[in-house]
Image: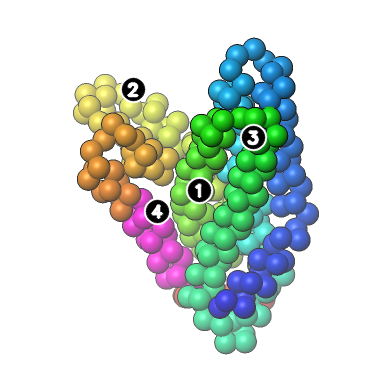
Amino acid sequence: MRRTIGADIIRIQRKKSLLITSFLVISFILLAGIIAGLGVIKGDKNENFSMFVTAAIAFCPFMTGIPIFTSVFSDDFKSHSMQVSIGRGFSRNKLVYARFFETLIMVVEAFVVFSLFIIGLAVIFGINSKGMMEPIKNLWMSYPNIICYFAVSMIFVFLTQSGTLGLVVYILLAASVTDMILNLLSMVPFIRDMKYDITNITIDGMIGCVYSSEREIWKRAVYGVAVLVIFIIIPIIASKKIFKHKELEF
């Protein structure tokens, strides 16, 4: 499985779509860093650097996640490489695990590059440690969200043997569409009277509860376990079950 993952990662790294979007994210970070570092906007440059760079990386779930998703899943079915791997004796369960681990690795790789670039800019413009680490912290805090989006969307990829529906689901999750819908529903009188924020049941909502310093540690731990089970383990199990009984198209 390691050889398969390694070969796929090398293939994905060469994809023009990923290279272009990564370059765009780096360009946004560079622009934000220059504006803050040169004092183009009045105010404390450390706070401005943190704020502007954080805004620049806010699109990472889209700019980084989408090309990784299409490279890992859509191309797999288009090129029939998955069918070839199975034909050579690679189990379906291992393929599901391999594709999931590939997304983990690729997002980490992209985030490491972005983090190093932010550090380099901060050093050049004399930004203090707080101003430098805040956007890096915000960047990595989005990592669990992206991985959960991948895991849930993966179900639809193996269900349809196409990356299209899975990509649509990923985009909807990354755009927090479910949170918007639940926010609207929370305005309904009897739901509002429940005195419970129903958006806490979404990926973003649950992970937000994990990060919330206002909650007790044990509650944050419970939410953390819930995120792991509901949005990662269960989707992977579901993907394996679906793919196991799915007739592959050649």
Q: Residues within 10 Å of mark 1 (few under 14, many from 20)?
A: some
Give the CA distance from mark 1 to mark 2.
30 Å
Amino acid carrying mark 2 in the image = Met
Residue drawn at (58%, 17%) of the image: 44
Q: Is mark 4 on a helix, strand or loop?
A: helix
* Residue where numbered disc 4 is placed: 231
Give yes or no for residue 82 being in the magenta stretch: no
* Stretch in magenta: 227-243
Q: Which residue is drawn at 63% across and 62% down?
A: 72
| Residue 31 visible to an observer of this rendering | yes
Q: Quadrant of the C terminus?
A: bottom right
Decide: marks 1, 2 in contact (CB < 8 A)? no
Residue occupied by mark 1:
143
Q: Callout 3 environment at 10 Å: few (<14), some (14 to 19), or many (20+)?
A: many
Dot 3 falls on a residue whose secondary structure is helix
User: Of circles 4 and 3, which is in front?
Assistant: 3
Farthest top residue in view: 42
Q: Determine crowd level at label 4: few under 14, some 14-19, many 20+ residues with C-alpha closer than 10 A.
A: many
Q: In which quarter of the image is the N terminus?
A: bottom right
Task: Pinpoint residue 116: horizontal percent, then vertical percent.
Answer: 64, 46
| Mark 3 or 1: the one toward you | 3
Give yes or no for contact between labels 3 and 1 (Cβ–Cβ under 8 Å): no
Asked if 249 appears above or below 180 in the picture, the reply is below
Instruction: Name the residue tied to disc 3.
Output: 122
Tag 1 secondary structure: helix
Task: Give the mark nearer the N terminus: 3 vs 2.
Answer: 3
Residue 168 percent across, percent down from the top left: 58, 47
> Given the image, on which type of amino acid does mark 4 rest?
Phe
